[in-house]
Amino acid sequence: MYEPKIIGFLCNWCSYAAADLAGTSRIQYPSNMRAIRVMCSSRIDPEHVLRAFVNGADGVLIAGCHPGDCHYISGNYKTERKYVLMRKMLEQFGIDPRRLRLEWCSSAEGGKFAQVVTEMTEELRTLGPIQLGAGD
Amino acid sequence: MVGSVMVVGGGIAGMQASLDLADSGFRVYLVDKAPTIGGVMAQLDKTFPTLDCSMCIMAPKLVATGRHHNIHLLTNADIINVEGNPGNFTVTVKMNPRFVNAEKCTGCGLCAQYCPVEAVNEYDERLTLRRGIYVDYPQAVPLVYAIDREKCIGCGLCENICQAEAIEYDQTPSEEKVNVGAIILAAGFDEFEPDTKKEYGYGRFKNVVTATEFERILSASGPFAGHVVRPSDGEIPKRIAFLQCVGSRDEKSNKYCSAVCCMYATKEAIIAKEHNPDLEATIFFMDMRTYGKGFEQFYQRAQSEYGLSYIRSRVPCIEENPETQNLLLTYETEDGTITKAEFDMVVLSVGLEPPKSSQELSTVFGVPLNDYGFLDWKIFEPLKAKEGIYACGAFSGPKDIPDTVAQASGAAAMASGVISGERGTLVEEKVYPQEIDVAEQQPRIGVFVCWCGINIGGIVNVPEVMEYASTLPNVVFVDQNLYTCSQDTQEKIKQAVEEHNLNRVVVASCTPRTHEPLFQSTIREAGLNPYLFEMTNIRDQCSWVHMHTPEEATEKAKDLVRMAVAKSNLLEPLKSSSVEVTQSGLVIGGGIAGMTAALGLAQQGFTVHLVEKEDHLGGLLRSIRFTMSGEDPQEYLATLEQSLRDHPNVHIHTGTTVERIDGYVGNFTTALSSGEEIRHGICVVAVGGQEHKPASYLYGKDERVVTQLEFEDMLSKGVKAKTVVMINCVESRDDTKEYCSRVCCSEAVKNALKLKEKNPDTNVYILYRDMRTYAFREQYYDRARENGIVFMRYDPETKPRLEKKGESLVLYAHDAALDLDFELHPDLVVLSTGVSPYDNSALSQMLKVPLDRDGFFLEAHMKLRPVDFATDGVFMAGLAHSPKFIDETISQAYGAVARACTIISKERIETEPIIAEVDEELCCGCQVCIPMCPYNARELDEEENIVKVNEVLCKGCGSCVAACPSGAAQQRHFRDNQLSSMIEAFVRR
């Protein structure tokens, strides 16, 4: 079976902690995602997302703190604004915007984190491998 | 005098006090009865009114407390004796055995998986089971397991499985004597146990739960994994009733108001509604006491946006339908109608009681308790239990988290004030060897792969991952360890660095959130810069979550190691720079808040400038003639002013305003209207507030209509009136001012009682919407009713009307409780008009700090940073923050002192190493980055037309870096090339 490859940019304070909690709670989810920890989701710029797709990612997850919970006051709002633009940009590059996801996971939401990765993996399985330049 | 402090109780109050003390040069011993710290806040799902995730905001404080080299945790411990005097106490602490060696236990949790014994899980409010060997919650600090010897059957399975050899069945209690200069009691509270209220069927009816149980049910980490279901059958409840004042405002249990339940019930109902939008949530209450900052707006939103129903009625009893296990409530509404309603679940808003240990603490420490069993305190000394011993948080009365945190900082200031001369004498600085210069060296990477007992090694093929790591570019050394975090492995890592000339270290094990600082410290001891370290998580995010697919887990671990190694090739040593601190303070505003803060700072040994716009000190306190509890505010004010004038560290500037403030934390320069220029390291905003002057009820048109403060002044001189009517919430909780001013209900009660005391024959009416005499102020509300003061509730839709008929005043009121119209003929009408902020816009711009939408100053975080601004080095206290009482203002002012001391107690402050920087060659001065920064850390250098980063202010989020169109902005340790290297290494080539 085709297994999609996912890069997950997780903010240090909430979503990376949620991923840790999924672990301490032994919640099982597919092994398709590889995490890159950043201090805040707002660190991610469109170039990282494009670079991920160019380097073989079938999907990119950006996960941050819930609105209002950002450790840096307002970083996640900036991420959300960029996310809207990034989805448009992906379309222009011929990449299905469903391959990029933005999710909020608090550090108490291990279950939600596992569910997000599970759902995303399943969705990408149906989308199939990314085909750059071929109008994915 | 001894430069250390003991803090008793490790909840949010104890942690905050400990951190403030440890960060300002004192050694701290933090004692908790429980095996881990965290207290009640660790059990909460979310916090009001912002609905922040409780664990998310608390976890960084937990970790900081656990790792602070000047905080010594004494958990699972009781205090048995105290001797000595302020400045030099000897405390005997009994260390109860946990039967697990705290030094050896790595917290991996394998023992709990194998333990065959089940016990009730107290952390989950008895809704789930835990093992006989346990830790309360996954984020607990210290993360050391404990054996519940009452349940343990001694089978020895944990001892056999623990590869760290940490199980010690033969541990016995031991005693430790600790020498400290001051003590802070932060023992928290216990909940009212509703079993005694048989009429509610708690314990008999499965679907009647307490609010804390419901909090666990709401929590994603709770008994039902965040699914809001009822305990009896796991069904999703469609109708939930919340019953307020269970064990509060009750003759039979506790007479006082528990101060937080109205808000927590509203919060829980909202969260439940977010889980299930079809939920019908009904809150049965007597008075809705949403008196804090942002609370009234929260209550309004609960009704308008979430559609919660509020019914003003005290429900006498609950019956259960034995078939459905639904609950039947019969209650009487104000109009006398008896209504029956069925609910799927009932949540009891149980009150706060003194901690069970309160009597014991009172005896051991010799501190007084009040009639209710909480710590007794005086209005002008709200933090003092007795000389040298201070208190904060719910131990001195029910209160919410922000008030608790402000008090905790305040208690830290009081405690350190006693021993300020000993600052820095007992703190330890770790000394590291000279750093090896790696600038010219090729990367030589060492990779350490952890087994974590069998936590990783049982799933992931560790030898295979290690073998694979050795094939990666620039990896010159690989090793595997049973526990990479154990002490002997630290020695092995140091040895490897030396023997193989490693200049980068990668550890593949658990989470960097808890363990990165340990490994960074290890490589520092081997002479490497701590930022030449990279960690990847192959346990929490790999072996534990892919337990059934070991091959996939092994492949993922290899990928993660490859990505970490790729980044480590590009790691650079980072240094924090440091800037000199002007060790003095500026306090703006000379009311009770500013005066207290100034005196507090002076007592800590710092020079302080107190600036007041009026010609005299005192602010609003000058208008307060008496207090509820009978003290003389003017006498206190005079003493306080004298102490300030006598103190050599205090410079008072009355009749002066602030014209301009430049600089940043540690180094401010302020120009005063007097022409003077002051240099200071911190700034406290204590500009106060004012009594709102109304435009309604003939105020200003008839001299028989006065405000509460004007009336208070009249009272001090003598009032002649047959009938006095007070109207509460005038131009408050409405379109004029949305917020509740917190103090007016109590102020009205105070003045009414004073009037009755002086003129017992005067008829006094108080027209109110909700009586918000929260916490112990409830006793004065009770007394007012006993003294014949008439309370009449009105609805905002049928506000009282005041008219002048001939020379007489006529007041038309509709009593909402009786649904009757009344006509009163007052000689005097007293309006409770609430507190308004001054026009703070100019100061807010000068300091670059925000105001909230009501015009008060906005704190950095509503819950955990109530006296801080988001801008470092600027603090607030008193009415500038929001309306509050004198004791709360004093607590907050001392809180600001403690927070300020964490900065000005240091000669230099170090900047964060992971911050943003600008490549001056690439920056074109477009300034896109500037508004991205929430901390005002970026500024345009107009001469060079490039943007510069203020390294002191930058917190290192990287928002600005992502915004920079030219690549000039970079975030250290998360540079574009470092992130890209991980992305490029993501797929195995």
Image (tube, rainbow, N blue to C red):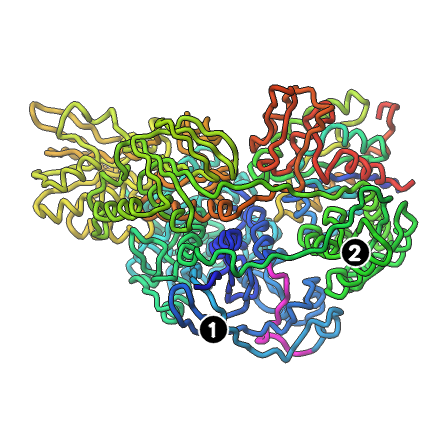
How dense is the environment of label 1, judged by Cα within 10 Å: few (below 14), some, or many (20 and up)?
some
Q: Name the residue carrying label 2.
A: B547
What subunit carries mark 2?
A: B
Would residue B853 appear left or right of A133 to someone viewing this image?
left
Query: Who comes first in sequence, dot 2 or dot 1?
Result: 1
Identify which residue, B20 or B499, lies in the foreground.
B499
Mark 1 secondary-structure assignment: strand
Identify which residue, B291 or B74, lies in the foreground.
B74
Q: Quadrant of residue A86?
A: top right
**Quarter of the image with the C terminus of chain A in it:** top right
Q: Is residue B347 visible?
A: yes
Identify which residue, B649 or B312, lies in the foreground.
B649
Task: Report the residue at 63% width, 70% height from top.
Answer: B132
Q: Quadrant of residue A54?
A: top right
Identify which residue, B964 or B99, lies in the foreground.
B964
- Magenta segment: does it hold B153? yes
Task: Report the residue at 23% width, 46% height from top.
Answer: B638
* Residue extent of the magenta highlight: B141-155
* Image vertical order of residue B176 relative to residue B12, above or below: below
At which x and y percent is residue B584? Answer: 44, 42
Q: Amino acid at mark 1?
A: Thr
Q: Name the residue carrying label 1.
A: B92
**Quarter of the image with the N terminus of chain A in it:** top right
- Magenta segment: does it hold B43? no
Mark 2 secondary-structure assignment: loop
Would residue A105 appear left or right of B602 to someone viewing this image?
right
